[in-house]
Amino acid sequence: MKKILCLALSIILALSVLALVSCNTGSNDNTDDENKTPDQVETLKMGLGVHVSTTATNADGDKNGQGNAVITVATVTVDKDGKIVACAIDVADNTVKYTYDGKAISEESFKTKYEMGSSYGMVQYAGSAKEWFEQADAFCTLVKGKTVDEVKALVVNGDKGNDDVIAAGCTITVNEFVLAIEKACKNAAESNATSANTLKLGIYTEQTASDADGDKKGTNEIETTIFACAVDADGKIVAAVADCVAVEFTFDANGASTYDATKAVVSKREAGDAYGMVQYAGSAKEWYAQADAFAAKCIGKKVGDVSSLMDDKGYGSEDVKGAGCTIVVMGFVKAASKIK
């Protein structure tokens, strides 16, 4: 009996030792974890892409001539594997007009398709199941986790989305979305944005017009400024990028268009050094570099506070000028003010 009891005690002791060894092994792992630096949240690249298409028509009797610029904008955050983490899309479909006797017509205001919301009328007038902004949101949701090549594969028949896109609730043409996203991914640069942040887009358009007079051409120019940012849970900007597209529609004293719609239109950022502020205007920095300097000053501010970076003449504050942004910043501020 004593032998059995001793054997049992020996077994219990052996199991206890094994248990202690096992516990000590786990404890060592936990200690190692505790001694390690906590994994940092992955920071993402952020990019902005702009695709522009234009058309122009002649005035004819009582029918005004017009210039139209469709400016499709996409902003994305991208991870280290080149996959889209977040995406936001909007379109500024801007039209300006001129009369048969060469007079420019001024518009009261310009709104983007997303800004128009339900008033865009796809549900009410076109019988669509979803409004434009809802379809754009559906497409943005669908591209999450995809690479550029995978996003490009979503387009069929030249412009419409494939079955996956349609099933997601996006039945509108998406080819220009894809072109803008492709540029945004290509332009993506290191930032402080993370997957916890929300992407926001603000787009502001202003018009400058003059009548035709004799041999002097009339002009009806639209300048569309874009401000994209990633904001944290407190609404503070953690990353930002800005761009601008200027399209000058020209016409003669008879209201005939003299604008070349076959010529590709690129944004000021896309023009890069060829924009010519350094070479032709003697600026210390090119336009895109000045826009970046302004965007950097927005970090840590709420969108509603971006206006504090502008003086009463539309230029940057002294702090902004000191950072290297000496251009007019009113467009950036007004674009940011459009963000909700």
Image (cartoon, rainbow, N blue to C red):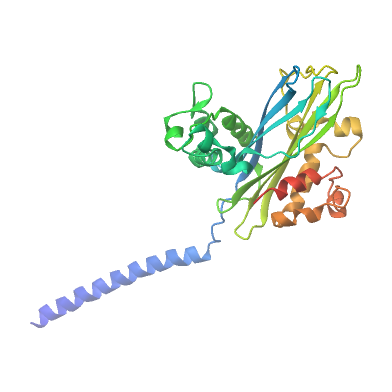
Q: Measured from the top left, where is residue 54 in percent x and y?
A: 69, 24
The residue lying toward the viewer, choosing from 271 and 175, is 175
Q: In x, y percent, where is residue 276?
A: 85, 30
At horizontal 90% and vertical 20% (from top left) the residue drawn is 216
Q: Quadrant of residue 166?
A: top left
Q: Is residue 257 in view?
A: yes
Identity of the residue drawn at 79% across and 46% down: 293
Instruction: Farthest residue to the front: give it.
Output: 62
Q: Is 22 placed left or right of 233 in the picture?
A: left
Q: Is residue 28 above or below residue 249?
A: below
**Could you say where residue 186 lies in the image, as x and y percent from the top left?**
63, 34
Please state the horizontal and vertical placement of residue 206, each as a whole percent of the image. Answer: 78, 38
- Left or right of 49 in this view: 25: left
Q: Residue at x 53, y 62 (%)?
A: 36
- Residue 78 in sight: no
Quarter-of-image position of residue 236? bottom right
Toward the left, the furthest residue is 1
Residue at the far bottom: name it: 2
Look at 71% across and 17% down and name the residue there: 262
Between 18 and 222, the residue placed more toward the observer is 222
Tell me: 325 left or right of 121.
Answer: right
As drawn, 180 above or below 241:
above
Residue 197 drawn above or below residue 22: above
